[in-house]
Image (cartoon, coloured by chain):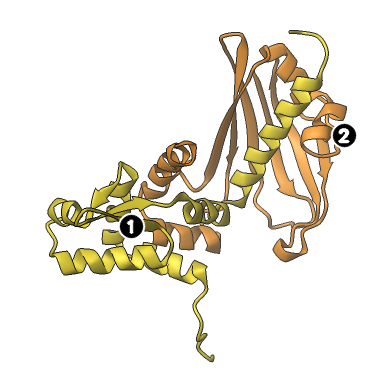
Chain colours: A yellow, B orange
Amino acid sequence: MPRRVKESPLDQLFAALANPTRRDVLDALLDGDRSAGDLARLFEMSRPSVSEHLRALREAGLVEERAVGRQRIYRVTATPLAGLVDWLSPYERFWRDRLAALGGVVDRMDGDD
Amino acid sequence: MTEDLRTIRVDQFYPHPPAKVWRALTTPELMARWLMPNDFRAEPGHRFTFQARPVGATGFSGVIACEVLEVIPPHRLRISWADAAQADSARTEVSWTLTAEGTGTRVLLEHSGFDPDDPTQRLARRIMGGGWRGRVLASLAAVLDG
């Protein structure tokens, strides 16, 4: 089978999440923004390996960085995660949408209130 | 939200009393407006279908075969749910549980019985591992609200 040359964003997302350390890093960032130095201390890792994991997460669009003074602060970006959740569980989105639609129907009904 | 890949849980609050939400949930014409056209009756054992548009890409036929399993007005409705055209499709269950909350109603929807051997779900488990997915879903809600 010929290899696919180009990776899709979903490939990058899954590759980034397939690594348990990167899931732990993302997990920590879901609790709040942190600097690369914080993360290195938290996971007792060298700065270069933290940077490598952060780079993979950044390329997958899962985190973004900003400079604060001399530090780089990382935060989770939710959009690819929301897409991932929908991909893993299309029914979840279906029911979220349907329950929202139910709200519209109840709002327009007469009586009982 | 959802912890276990075999069950989907979604809840929503409505600023209306349970009796009114129950009516929207169990009246066929109203169900057609928020869910799908159907021949539902709120009687345990009643078999009925929902008619949707077929989705070619997923093999979904567009007809969902259901049976009413439990009716406790205005508290709980439980039905079975299966793609009518796929004999081997898993028979899943959908339930709605209504709880009065102040002057409104919280509805918890649970869709259970998904096949743990489904390839997508196997892949999901391998990638996400353990309780991580549920954790992400819970945090995601906070992130999206923030």
B40 or A58: which is nearer to us? A58
Q: Which residue is mark 1?
A: A65
Q: Residue at x 78, y 46 (%)?
A: B64
Q: CA distance from mark 2 to mark 1?
A: 53 Å
Q: Can residue A81 be spotted in the picture?
A: yes
Q: Position of residue B15 (x, y in %)?
A: 65, 16
Q: Can residue A18 be spotted in the picture?
A: no
Numbered tag placed on residue B39 in the rendering: 2
Q: Mark 2 is on which residue type?
A: Asp
Q: Would residue B3 be found to the left or right of residue B83 on screen? A: left
Q: Secondary structure at mark 1?
A: strand
Q: Mark 1 is on which residue type?
A: Glu
Q: Quadrant of residue A103?
A: top right
Q: Is residue A24 above or below residue B38?
A: below
Chain on which label 1 sits: A
Q: Position of residue B42 (x, y in %)?
A: 79, 23
Q: Badges 2 and 1: C-beta atoms under 8 Å apart?
A: no
Q: Residue at x 48, y 41 (%)?
A: B144
Q: Residues within 10 Å of mark 2 (few under 14, many from 20)?
A: some
A19 or B27: which is nearer to us? A19
Q: Quadrant of residue B70?
A: top right
Q: Residue at x 30, y 48 (%)?
A: A29
Picture quarter with the C terminus of chain B: top left
